[in-house]
Amino acid sequence: MKFVYVFLMVLLLIALAVMSYLFILFKRIATIDLMTGLKNRNAYEIKLKQLGRKLKNEEAWIVIYDVDSLKALNFRGGHLMGDRAIIAVADTLKGVFCEKAYSIFRIGGDEFVVIAVDASEDELKIKISKTESILEGFSASKGYARINYGSENSYSTAFKRADEMLFKEKKEKVK
C-alpha cells in the first residue's frame, strides 16, 4: 500500500512539472514573436496596462520604428528578403536597447515599438542614432515622443506624436 502511495505522489509531481512547463511554454508563445524573438503585440498591450498603473512621475518615452519599403523588398527579393529586413531591424534594436530600462516589441508586420522608462532624451537620441549606423542594407524610419503619465490620454498622445515624426521622416526619404 505504501508503494502505491509513493507511486501516486511521484505521478502527481511529474504531472505538476509538466503542467508548469506547458504554462511557461504557452505564455512564451502568447507573448513572443517567433520570427524575431521580440515581445509581441500581446506583451505590448500587457506592458501598457502595467505602465499606466505604475508610472506617475518617472520619465518615459516611446520610439516607433517602421521598416522602409518593405513591400518593394518583398516584390524585388521575395518574402524572405522582407523577413531578413524585419529580423535585421529586430536584431539591431535588441543590440542597442539592451538595458533593463527598455522594452522592445514587434507590434505589427514591420512596426516595432521601444518603451523607455527612466531614460533621458539625450540618452534616447544617442541610441536612436546608433540604430541608424548599425542597420546595413536596410533602413527604418522612426519617431519618438515623451509619455506624460500625469495627463489624460498620455500614451495615445505620445504614440500619435511619435507616429507623426516617423511618417515625416518616411516622406523625406521618398523625396
Image (cartoon, rainbow, N blue to C red):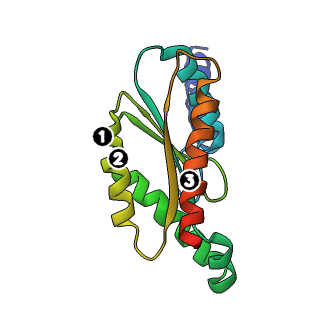
- Is residue 102 shown above or below 109? above
Residues under labels 2 and 1: Cα distance?
Answer: 5 Å
Q: Please tell me whether residue 16 is drawn above or below residue 57 in the rendered image.
A: below
Q: Which residue is mark 3?
A: 166
Which comes sooner in the sequence, label 3 or label 2?
2
Q: Secondary structure beneath disc 3?
A: helix
State how far apart marks 1 and 3 are (Cα): 18 Å
Quarter of the image with the C terminus is bottom right
* Quadrant in which the N terminus is drawn: top right
Residue located beneath label 1 in the image = 122
Q: How many marks?
A: 3
Is label 1 in a helix, a strand or a loop?
helix
Q: Are marks 2 and 1 in contact (CB under 8 Å)?
A: yes
Q: Position of residue 144 (x, y in %)?
A: 49, 43
Residue at 57%, 56% in the rendered image = 168
Decide which of tag 1 and tag 3 comes sooner along the chain. Answer: 1
Label at residue 125 = 2
| Residue 9 shows up from this direction | yes
Identify which amino acid the numbered label 3 is placed on: Leu
Q: Real-space Cα distance between discs 3 and 2?
A: 14 Å
Q: Residue at x 48, y 14 (%)?
A: 56
User: Which residue is at a point 44% across and 29% down the rendered structure image?
Assistant: 60
